[in-house]
Amino acid sequence: MIGKKSASWMNQIDERIMEWIRENGFASPSILSRERGFDVSSGYIRDRCRWLQYAGLLAPVSGDLYDLTSEGILYLKGELDASHYPRPTPSKVFEDRYATPPDWVEAGVKFTIRL
């Protein structure tokens, strides 16, 4: 057993998110933000879940619900060194935040401004 070794980008909330999910089952950021021990907003937890998802430690189940991956379970057992996993960057983790929705249809309406 190599012991639990977190990556340099991970913080205490990341581990708390993963431990809560291991003990209670999948969860959404809004559920976690209401739990004792999480003194941060659901938006912050949502962002951290995305970082953990990018690293392969969490996976979305449905909508805004996340669950541990096999790697996440191994990490919590101390059998996986997360420092060898991809280092998330904001551009990689949030690249879809402002993306055009796939069902977007351009209206084709033109405006004329007369002065």
Image: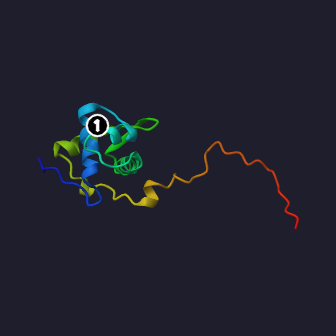
Find residue 108 and report its horizontal and vertical position in percent.
79, 50
Amino acid type shown at disc 1: Ile
| Residue found farthest to the right | 114
Could you tell me which residue is drawn at 35 percent across and 35 percent down? 27
In the picture of the structure, the residue carrying the numbered disc 1 is: 21
Asked whether, in this view, residue 31 is left or right of residue 70, the answer is: right
On screen, residue 44 versus residue 2, left or right, reads: right
Q: How many marks?
A: 1
Return the residue found at the far top. Answer: 25
Q: Nearer the viewer, residue 32 or 108?
A: 32
Residue 34 to residue 110: above or below: above
- The residue at the point 40 percent across, 60 percent down is 89
Query: In the rendering, at what x and y percent does residue 30 appear?
Result: 39, 39
For label 1, count other residues whose C-alpha is less than 10 Å away and answer few (under 14), some (14-19) or many (20+).
some
Name the colour scheme.
rainbow
Residue at 26%, 61% in the rendered image? 8
